[in-house]
Image (cartoon, coloured by chain):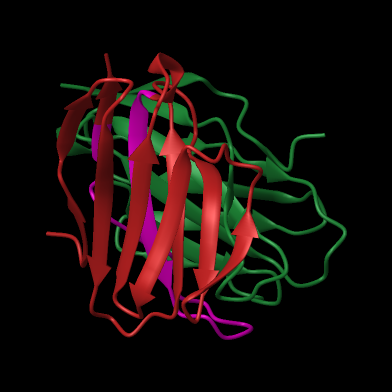
Chain colours: A red, B green
Amino acid sequence: DTEVTQTPKHLVMGMTNKKSLKCEQHMGHRAMYWYKQKAKKPPELMFVYSYEKLSINESVPSRFSPECPNSSLLNLHLHALQPEDSALYLCASSQEWAGSSQPQHFGDGTRLSIL
Amino acid sequence: AQKITQTQPGMFVQEKEAVTLDCTYDTSDQSYGLFWYKQPSSGEMIFLIYQGSYDEQNATEGRYSLNFQKARKSANLVISASQLGDSAMYFCAMREPNSGNTPLVFGKGTRLSVIA
């Protein structure tokens, strides 16, 4: 069992739908991340939140809208997605201080399919 | 230029044998962290081992050890006594500088298959 919980595990949606991916951690981590992973590729960074503030946005299209309502939760709101957005979406969290040897902890991911 | 290079797309190893997965990295930072993750077909990313750039000893975690050669900028993962459950995708990753809220950059991965 992972300490980062992502829901749902699978999501199928049409291009006109609005849905949200959720991520929750209770390890006291103040840095949280969204990664996108296409099949047979490494994860690619989308967003970083540090102390509930967006610190990195890797030029992600506006149809992806992140939200960090508190230190334990991270959401990714989806709207008007394209078929090429079908992928595994991974959430991760980590301790935020410099020199930390602690790794990023990942959730199990949400497998998203756009019809 | 790639930050993390994993030159082996796929590797096979006999059960109970040791295997080395290669990873080289590119950075001009003095402070960086190197990580290895395992990703089974189910999708979760499992942290295996960490090496900091200032660590003088090679990291070890159970059957996993990291062969860190700083001058060569390599951080190879050694898995001893391979098990069937080790079959998975393995990613080498780096963060620079080595701050906790710095995102990871991943290599392309190596798919390891353990043969009975």
Q: Is residue A106 magenta?
A: yes
Is A103 drawn above or below residue A1 in the view shown?
below
From where the camera sits, is residue B42 visible?
yes
Which stretch is magenta?
A: A86-111
Image position of B13 (left or right of A12): right
Residue A19 in which image quadrant: top left
Q: Residue A48, image x and y in percent?
A: 54, 62
Extreme-left residue of the structure = A1
Closer to the camera in the image, B81 or A87: A87
Residue drawn where x is 26% and y is 60% of the image: A23
Residue A89 in which image quadrant: top left
Closer to the camera in the image, A87 or A22: A22
Q: Residue B17, image x and y in percent?
A: 31, 34
Q: Looking at the figure, which quarter contains the N terminus of chain A?
A: bottom left
Closer to the camera in the image, B86 or A115: A115
Residue B30 in which image quadrant: bottom right
Residue drawn where x is 55% and y is 47% of the image: A45
Is B83 drawn above or below residue B93 in the view shown?
above
Image position of A7 (left or right of B66): left
Q: Is residue A108 magenta?
A: yes
Residue drawn where x is 70% and y is 70% of the image: B53
Q: Looking at the figure, which quarter contains the C terminus of chain A?
A: top left
How many marks can you see?
0
Q: Residue A30, image x and y in percent?
A: 44, 80
Q: Residue B58, image x and y in percent?
A: 56, 66
Residue drawn where x is 48% and y is 26% of the image: A41
From where the camera sits, is residue B82 visible?
no
Extreme-front residue of the structure = A16
Is B73 drawn above or below residue B85 in the view shown?
below
Is A32 drawn above or below residue B40 in the view shown?
below
Closer to the camera in the image, B78 or B26: B26
